[in-house]
Image: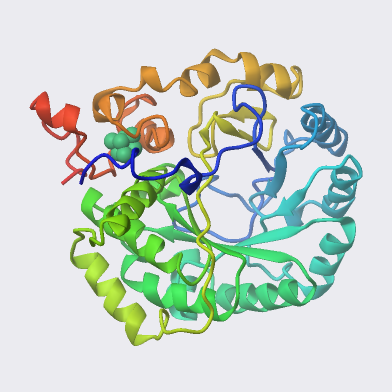
Amino acid sequence: MTHPRAAAPRRLVRTPRHAVADRPFLVIWESTRACPLACLHCRAEAIPRRNPRELSGAQARDLMDQIAAFGRPHPLFVITGGDPFQRPDLTELIAYGTGLGLRVAVSPSGTPTLTRQNLTAVRDAGAVALSLSVDGSTAARHDTFRGVDGVFGLTLDGWRAARELGLKVQVNTTVSRCSMEDLADIAALVHREKAMLWSGFLLVPTGRGAALDSLTAQETEDVLHFLYDCGAVMATKTTEGHHFRRVVLQRAALAERGELPRTGALHARLTARAHALGLFDGGHRAVRRPPMDVSSGRGFVFVSHTGEVTPSGFLPLSADNTKHRPLMDIYRESPLLQELRDPSLLRGKCGVCEYKTVCGGSRSRAYAVTGDYLAADPWCAHRPPAWQQAGEEEESPCAQ
Ligand code: SF4
């Protein structure tokens, strides 16, 4: 494929209104690691009980004060877990955050706590959105992945209740060898149940996720193209799939020339299945949602249950702790986060890639696979011209 920058307008990819060196667009707080599930991919390696060292209510309110101090428009604040409903002060904290003017979203687990009553309390406290995990299109597939029977039904009930309550629902799907052949069926479910947004989370082999089979780079490419195709009928995005932005630019350039992408067998199978399910047949068309240009430490930051600030939930290197240093100072001054915001420091093929300023690859995956957070993303099939000219070999057995 040719370099699309000249042909593709910049608005194909959104950028935050404020400089990403100045303030994050998104802050995710792991409110607790307590969760009754035992999901195969769990980053947090969740545990049944709350850790006594997790942020207290007062420390959590202090964190929200620190986020509000970035100024308006405030970063979006997502409360995740574990299962946030394991914190008895959850709605109190949501109300405090919304009182400060933060836009608060909650990411609960599909447990018996996901009731209409609890969701009503979350909505009434001011939360604007909910994100839920759906990793299989059927109860059998999803519950196997999540490790507990009944989770699929609880999630679907919670999803429908949240929608009826006026909460926007984002659905997250872990893309791994366990789910890749089921993605068209999951897409059809997401479309049918009218989620606000479907996010394909490209697995980072860390935590329990390290034990799952990784996709090859070509299979990953096929999934990204399938997510792009689904963008014609519903809003789609990726998590830890930064090269989706490269695919969006490439597809737009190809479309202008009336050409189709050269994709692999997985894309063909997913497309055929999606057509068989009627996913692309008329009906509800969506305005394609441009992906947001943020990545680990660059517009995005994660605060752990104990207050450690890391570039993402999947890159377990601490920049400092909000218990004793303000998030604003950490975000702006941490050498780790500053390094991650500098694409000129990227190594391997990401370092010479023509898309490095708009993509840059998953720093979390690079770290999980190679131990070097500036190394190339091993799940990217793109072959930058400068890389090929240098006659370099691919860097990872994943990148076939
Ligand atoms: S080589 Fe790196 S920067 Fe280029 S598209 Fe792939 S992941 Fe992105």
**Which residue is at a point 69% across and 73% down the rendered structure image?**
158
For the rendered model, the colour scheme is: rainbow
* Residue 6 falls in image quadrant: top left
Q: Tell me which image quadrant ligand 1 sits in.
A: top left
Can residue 200 be spotted in the picture?
yes
Q: Is residue 302 left or right of residue 351?
A: right
- The location of residue 203, given as percent across then percent down, is 40, 50
In the figure, 94 relative to 293: above or below? below
- The location of residue 61, given as percent across then percent down, is 85, 36
- The location of residue 297, given as percent across then percent down, is 55, 28
In the figure, 183 relative to 140: above or below? above
**Which residue is at a point 47% across and 17% down the rendered structure image?**
339
Q: Is residue 30 left or right of residue 343?
A: right
* Residue 16 falls in image quadrant: top right
In the figure, 99 relative to 375: above or below? below
**Which residue is at a point 51% across and 75% down the rendered structure image?**
285
**Which residue is at a point 54% across and 81% down the rendered structure image?**
192
Q: Is residue 216 left or right of residue 318?
A: left
Q: Nearer the viewer, residue 170 or 258?
A: 258
- The location of residue 57, given as percent across then percent down, is 86, 39
Q: Is residue 7 left or right of residue 9?
A: left
Can residue 31 be spotted in the picture?
no
Residue at the outermost left position:
391
